[in-house]
Image: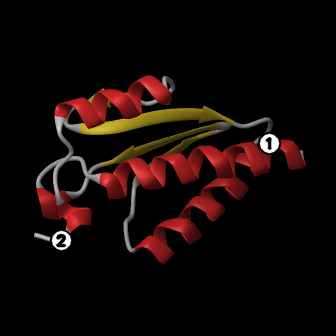
Amino acid sequence: MAPNLTVLAPEALQSFLSQHPEWKHEGGMIRRTYEAPSFLAGIAFVEKVAQAAEKADHHPDIDIRWRKVTLALVTHDAGGLTARDTGLATEADRLFVEVARAQ
């Protein structure tokens, strides 16, 4: 199995979660809800995440509720969480800061 499809060891997942406390491990996925300064900022964030996801060929579940955007990540092909998930989560955090600062 390719390294990016290796399921994270529990210690690696806990390390990620301790460094990114906004992300929660729920239902076998990592999940975070972002609250944008406006609806359009939330949509701009989703567009940036979509571009990053397409580039990584790794697509999160996305739920948009007015200014709140929830991302949920899991590597279905690997049957669990992998570095692809934590990597995209980290990139989403960076993109959210970028979008929020632009408002």
> Would you place residue 19 above or below residue 60 in this image?
above
Among the 4 quarters of the image, the one containing residue 43: bottom right
Residue 100: mark in rendering:
1
Neighbour tally class for label 1: few under 14, some 14-19, many 20 plus, Cα within 10 Å: some
Q: Residue furthest right?
A: 103
Q: Which mark is residue 45?
A: none
Q: Position of residue 33 (x, y in %)?
A: 52, 33
Give the position of the C terminus as an image quadrant. Answer: top right
Name the amino acid type tagged 1: Ala
Secondary structure beneath label 1: helix
Can you tell which of label 2 and label 1 is closer to the viewer?
Answer: 2
Rendered location of residue 31, percent (x, y): 39, 36
| Distance from the alpha carbon under mark 2 to that under mark 1 | 35 Å
Q: Quadrant of the N terminus?
A: bottom left
- Quick one: label 2, few (<14), some, or many (20+) residues within 10 Å? few
Q: Nearer the viewer, residue 88 or 50?
A: 88
- Give the side of residue 33 with respect to residue 84, left or right: right
**Residue 90 at what x, y percent from top left?**
52, 47
User: Residue at image x 85%, y 43%?
Assistant: 101
Image point (57%, 59%), residue name: 49
Q: What amino acid type should be assigned to the residue bearing mark 2?
A: Ala
Q: Secondary structure at mark 2?
A: loop
Q: Which mark is residue 2?
A: 2
* Residue drawn 55% across the image and 67% down it: 52
Q: Residue at x 58, y 71 (%)?
A: 51
Is 28 placed above or below 76 here? above
Left or right for 94, reference 41: left
Q: Residue 40, percent across and down?
A: 77, 51
